[in-house]
Image (spheres, coloured by chain):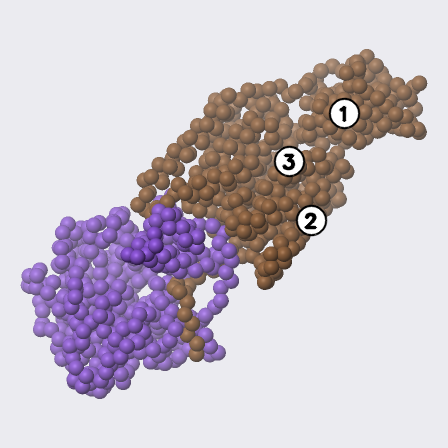
Chain colours: A purple, B brown
Amino acid sequence: MSLLTGPMRHHLDGHKDLTLTKPVLKTIDPDVVWIPLTNGNAPCKAVVNIGDEVKIGTKIAERNDRFFLPLFSPVSGTVTAIEKFMTSGMTQAEHLRIQNDHKNTTVRAFEPFDYEKASWEEVLDFVKNAGMLGLGGAGFPTYVKYLKPENVDLFIVNAVECEPYLTADYKNIEENISLLKTGTLALFKLSKAAKGCVAIKEDKVDQIAALKETFAGTPIEVRTVPNLYPMGWERTLVFQLTGKRYGMLPIEAGCILNNASTAIALGNAIDNGMPITHKYVTVSGDAIKNPQNVLVPIGTKAHEIIDACGGFVENMEDVLLVAGGPMMGKAIPNDQFVIAPQNNGLTVLKNIKNEEVKCLRCGRCTETCPSGLQPVRINFAQKRMDLEELETLSVNDCIECGMCTYICPSKIEVTEGVRRAKRFLRAKAAPGGKK
Amino acid sequence: MKYTYKPSPNYRQKQSTISIMRDLTVCLLSIVLFATVYNAIRYGFATGMRVILMTAAAVITALVTEAAYFKVTGAKDIVTEVRHSFGWVTAIIMVLITRLDVSIYAIVISTVICIIFGKLVFGGFGQNIFNPAAFGEAIIMNSFAASKAANITADVYSGATPMTAMNSYGWVMENSVFEEFIQQFGGLGNMMIGNYPTVIGASCAILIIICGAYMMWKKDIDWHLTVTYILSIFCISLVVGLIHGEGLWFAIFNLITGGVLFCGIFMMTDPVTTPITIPGRMIFAFGAAALTLIIRWKANLPDGALYSVLLMNMLTPAIDKMIKGNQIKEAKQIRNEVIIAGVVCTLVAILVGAFLEGKTPVVASSSAPASALSSEDFSSTNVSCTDQGNGVYACSAKGFEGVNEATVTIENGAVKSIEVTAFNDTPGVGDMATAEGELARYAGATTSSAIDSTSGASFTSTSLRAMVYEALTMAGE
């Protein structure tokens, strides 16, 4: 942010009041769950066979390539099939079908663990074997970030939740603040950081007070950030808190970040010996009848959650069903996808047609781009197939936060144009691609 | 239930290009309204209505031209195309930066040319290189300078505009002279509220600033460009003023007269023809500010704002090319580019300003003692008159540059009235002598009368006196 680059962020109307004060619906117990056997773009291998009995907490699959990540059963019942269909990330993946027996028999996945007495290596091993992954949306195995924590100044728990409509992290913290404390302190130890903090938006006054009380007497500070988008993005948050920019990874600026939900999940694993089995999911938007947060087993199908929230508002024939918040979440063309660990919202919106006008080169996308890019010029260069110009525009620094499309007064799909430019550059760079 | 796929994000802000253009149109119409009321009060209802007439002519021409163009090029939905082309904005701005005495046919032709060749041939809205309104006004200035609606000229633009009057002084004058000079426009305060002759829409500084502030608040226009431009103009002229020992008035006068405020708020903020990035816009503003003042001070043009817009429009693609890559990673280089551009432009303009030389307005002032018409020598004016009967004489005499013509009516050996039928001296200078009030001074004159020259317009005055004397002499024979 500076005089010359523009604000590089923007206040969005969050609509968070739709769900913020409502209780969390916890009664959803589907007859069948489908566990996506995928993490990032890598497949996970099932370690149970069809016909096996599983309990809540039974290890059912693992990723074992560059990274290691175990997956656990969120319900008790029988493994009945493996089928391939579309995930919430709009890729095809195999899903493990588990028939729920509704008995909720539980097996303790881990032995009781005292992170305070344990060595640093033991804590890292625990995080790795507990299947912790970035629950803010990335789904990246958590332990990888902590493999070489050198010269870390600041450990940050990200409770910013800047996507409009979403309040799942807020509700999760509200209900599990002591688990947050355990998980945060364990991760803080792992980070070897000089200081630690929980970052939260300044308008969440009640929760800020609760957090301050919880973390009183610990090295963890509570730090507030302005109510802007994309304040929860690593780079924007690190810059807000430290004034530093970095090249590839936040550790270059001396920071390690994790989402608050991830810290809570780790707290749950440490205190209760349970892995990630359930997820707080915000169901909101202007086309859902009863917007609220739900706590559902991983692998619950979207349509069951929508039905539990009263379905759509009346006379609704055409909706956008977005997995996540409306800015970065993808609109999925069916309701058969399931909740994966990294999902935190279902936003159901009326499909309103925008009146698109020609670009007037107003540059608003350039001023608000958190990566400092010029989306409008990337779009023009992409249309002209101007490889030379595209290569000067740092196209691959784009994180597809959606700000350029949001801000565009001409209602152009600017972000999609940048995606096309990325694909174009990839195709040209690929071996055999025409240069 | 239908689940539609759309690429993310699926969230839009409320502001739209259409709402931006609506706000802009409202602001422009408020200025049209001001100009209408002002001219109606000052020069009569018909003159006020002329503002509306010119605006309507330009807007209708723009809409019809665009509709015809889209029809010819085979657009499917002509109404939507015209709605999304925003031609009326161009038309209104063009009228507001033109003079009230431009004839309707000149307005219509210029609108057609600027809409087609200034905008549509480039690919329409969003693609044009030049600000179409400035393009249109440049056509009026260069092609229709002589085309004046005759009945308006004498009434409204009798006196000089502050720009032309200041030009005749070479821009530099004693502070005490300025105080006297500015009184002909009612002082700087009077100029702020727009009570002086200039182009139709650029007079009321306060109204223009209010419109600008409103649009900046609504985020319809980017403040960086306007503020940089206005501050640059102010700072450069303040320094130049100090070099010449002028007071603060020099900077304020340079800021509020001519098209600076109007251009800065309504024309340079046209995003289509200005750079995309904030640093690019600041470079644009530095360049435009320097050019405005250099053209104004040194060139033989009434004002520089218009041409500075057009010249900088040409550089816009080059400026955009300078700002590349990731603005966070390139921050240092971009900052240096902006600083270099700012320093160079400011220094060049200050240097040009430092060598300004004050002049005394071309010829004698009214304080020179006048002698009787009969004792003056009019031989150099080649004056001639034709008797048209009933005491009416059609006369012609050479003025400063060209030959002026007038109809002189004589009754009982004295002048009854004089009406200028053709004026060919310097517009904005010589025509001070042909103002209604000035001409009234000839009534009752005889060959022994002494008539003062109009200050700053003595050649034209001399040609008038020559015609009056010649007519009186013929009537006496």
The numbered disc on residue B403 is 1
Q: Residues within 10 Å of mark 2 (few under 14, many from 20)?
A: some
- Subunit of mark 1? B
Mark 2 element type: helix
Quadrant position of residue A234? bottom left
Q: Amino acid at mark 3?
A: Asn
* Category of crowding for the residue at label 1, using alpha-carbon neighbours closer than 10 angstroms: few (below 14), some (14–19), many (at least 20): some
Res B40 seen here:
no
Which mark is drawn over residue B385? Answer: none
Q: Residue at x 71, y 32 (%)?
A: B158
Whether tag 2 and tag 1 are in contact, CB under 8 A, the answer is no
Left or right: B433 as drawn, with respect to A199: right
Residue B343 in percent (x, y) is at: 41, 31
From the viewer's perspective, tell me whether residue B169 is left or right of residue A143. right
In the rendered view, tell whether residue A310 sits above or below residue B37: below
At horizontal 57% and vertical 49% (from top left) the residue drawn is: B121
The residue positioned 74% from the left and 22% from the top of the image is B399
- Find out whether the residues at labels 3 and 1 contact each other: C-beta distance under 8 Å: no
Q: Which residue is mark 3?
A: B142
Q: Which residue is mark 2?
A: B57
